[in-house]
Image: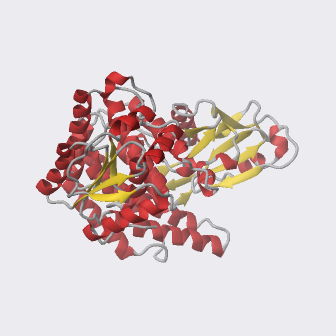
Amino acid sequence: MAETDDQRATIDFLSRPESYGLDGIVERIDTHAAIIFLAGEHAYKLKRAVRYPYLDFSTVARRREVCEAEWRLNRRTAPEIYLEVRSVNRQADGSLGFGKGEPVDWLVVMQRFGADDLLEAVAARGDLTETLVRDLADNIADFHDGAEVAEEKSGSGRLRKVIDGNREAMAVLPADLLSKADCESLYAASLASLEHLSDLLDRRAATGHVRHCHGDLHLANICLWQGKPTLFDCLEFDDGLATTDVLYDLAFLVMDLWEKGYRAQASLLFNRYLDCRMEIDGIAAMPLFLSVRAAVRAHVNATAAGRQASQADRLAKRNSAREYLEAALSFLIRPEPRLIAIGGLSGTGKSTLGAALAPDIGGVPGARWLRSDVMRKRLAGVAPETRLPPEAYTRDRNAQVYDRLMQDARRVLAAGHSVIVDAVFARPEERAEPSAIAKELGVPFLGLWLEAPTQTLLDRVSARKDDASDADRSVVERQIRYDPGDLADWHRVAAGGGQAEVLAGARRLLAPISGSVRTG
């Protein structure tokens, strides 16, 4: 890293409240590449005069260029937050100001929002709810759907550049920050994974999955704006780095959630996004995507360690960098995939159990959770929470839903990823198929049949709100007359009690088919 222009006078000017016509104080936030000054209702972002292997803000002209790019690109997702690009000028009397004069530096002016509205803070206080994560996944999927498609067709070549860039950024770090041996091991393992996935990544690029994305999608770059999760602070300094496979873009946030301990939310985000975009093929690349993203965080935190004023802060950043490096290595180690089917009448808690088990099963971020209620809505071309008319529940339509569930389960397993399939599975032939697929592919299978008292089922479906299931009391009353037939190959699970009890019972049944079920 190299410092270039002397920005001390500009920083001093921006640190004074009178520069903005205000009283009080100006708050300052420092990052490795920028300084943000919080003054009144606005935030003023100054690019540091720095040059890294992956970033160049070394001249005034370059900083103007990236400020304009930041304003333009972030208005795709946060037009009400990104207001303008403004210059700091040398005025006629020689002082700095916002009045007419020769520009000495450039700023992005933003509408200020509270620090408590950053998703990082929302998560820390325990408010990263299922509804919020679901809305966030929908927003990201919508953004990716509308993002500009890259003309270049080499998806593997793009990722190779990032892997090489990570290695270069790690190589210039002081020796006491990251283990050189671990960095080289990660590089070798990443290249081996990339070679295995090369054809898939190139195919995805050729079919429009490589787009101009956010590029820096983690919890600190998402806020609640007017109550809605809003993406901001995208990667603005290199269109090549920001133009990626959409799943690589998503992987940064999934990895960030997982590493900060929000594993249920990481699993839900991952699954909801895949539901939104009906995405399957790219799942095989997620281990490498997650690993590369963790490697980025490793060298960024290691670089930031050198900027910390106190020894304690420096050690905290260094330790964080080492943890990310360890995670980057671990993401490339994938357990054997498994297929779990969860059946039972409406109201038995299939989806509650599926959501709770998904983070436990297989590699990060857990199993692909395929839900018949969601599949039915997606095949109908509507959002999962949109209620469908009765004609969407004919026997022929049910057969289409089950057929697609099994097709998708087979493809996900073939990609090396574990699957949970959640459906009623009332008919013996419906229950036979997942077991047959698992046997054919040589993966462990577990069938769970949930049972609960009728009144419990009726109470649960009556209490549902904003859910993908359309089942009501009349559906339950009809289902309780079903004869499910032989359940010998499935495990009966008493599901009339609390969620924790049902989950514990399911985990006990899972343990014999794997020694790596996560319980924390």
- Left or right side of 17 for 493: left
- Left or right side of 197 for 494: right
In percent of width and height, residue 486 lies at 20, 52
Q: Nearer the viewer, residue 35 or 76?
A: 76
In percent of width and height, residue 140 lies at 46, 38
Q: Residue at x 65, y 35 (%)?
A: 226
As drawn, 73 above or below 167: above
In percent of width and height, residue 372 lies at 32, 39
**Visible in this render: residue 197?**
yes
Q: Nearer the viewer, residue 445 or 196?
A: 445
- Left or right side of 119 for 256: left
Q: Residue at x 47, y 37 (%)?
A: 467
Judged from this view, the residue extending furthest toward the left is 440
**Visible in this render: residue 154?**
no
Residue 31 lies in quadrant: bottom right
As drawn, 60 above or below 50: above
Q: Residue at x 61, y 55 (%)?
A: 126
As drawn, 400 above or below 189: above
Q: Nearer the viewer, residue 338 or 59?
A: 338
